[in-house]
Amino acid sequence: MARLNVNPTRMEQTRLKRRLATAKRGHKLLKDKRDELMRQFLEIVRHNLELRKKVEKALQKAHRSFTIASAVMSPEMLEEALMYPKQSVSLELCTKNIMSVNVPVYQFKMKSDDPAEIFPYGFATTSGELDDAVLALSQTLQDLLELAQSEKTAQMLAQEIEKTRRRVNALEYVMIPQLEETIKYIRMKLEENERGNTSRLMKVKDMMLEEQRQKNIRQDQEIYEAHCLSFEAKK
């Protein structure tokens, strides 16, 4: 693993150690976020699968009824019956936060609470199969909105999981090893410099001791010569 290009000083080592501690803490938080996002994502996917099966079954029922109604009614009568709907729907969009991801929440409200308002035609000239088709579509509207909400939520969570996974991998396999390798390099350099300084100090100490020893020898020699001269003078 390539190390960072920094000066091997104690100040730089301290700064990198702080960065390493922050990176490890961020790595743990991101892993916890990724795991929780995965748990939420799997729950939504399971719910989405069940909801999709339910919606597809309801739509197949409505399509079957509408196909039969199209067979027993003329195209003109069918178009006239569905031309002017009586019921209307208002849709509201808000968001909720799931692990820092703002996912959509759809809410709809019908103009009238009367169940009969979903039929925009009279019953005298239409078939019962058309009633079944309109009723099935009306009953599946809530499930359709919930399915759209669920699929959009799953898509956004998947994108956030991928983004978080890349960040976790970048910290785990690039940034943290680089910081550790650089701190190790600085520590080895500082130890090497410390050993060099110790060697120089020991050498200086040996030189000073040798100088002191030579000085003591010279002093002893001078004292000896002085005693000799004194002894000669007394003779």
Image (tube, rainbow, N blue to C red):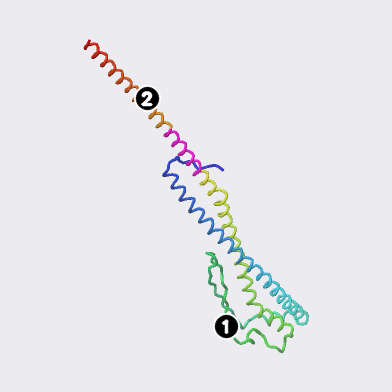
Q: Nearer the viewer, residue 17 or 45?
A: 17
Q: Which mark is residue 210?
A: 2
**In this figure, which residue is indicated by the disc labeled 1?**
111
Q: Earlier in the sequence, mark 2 or mark 1?
A: 1
Q: Which residues are magenta?
A: 182-198
Residue 153: x and y in percent read: 59, 67
How far apart are labels 2 and 1 at the CA level?
107 Å
Is 153 rendered above or below residue 123?
Answer: above
Assess disc 2: are there few (<14), some (14-19) or many (≥20) residues with their C-alpha within 10 Å of its C-alpha: few
Q: Nearer the viewer, residue 65 or 200?
A: 200
In the rendered structure, the answer to whether residue 14 lies left or right of residue 161 reads left
Is residue 190 inside the magenta stretch?
A: yes
Is 170 rendered above or below residue 103?
Answer: above
Looking at the figure, which quarter contains the C terminus? Answer: top left
Q: What residue appears at the point 62 percent right and 70 percent down from the top-left corner?
A: 148
Which quadrant of the structure image shows residue 92?
Answer: bottom right
Q: Residue lying farthest left?
A: 234
Q: Report the amino acid beneath label 1.
A: Lys
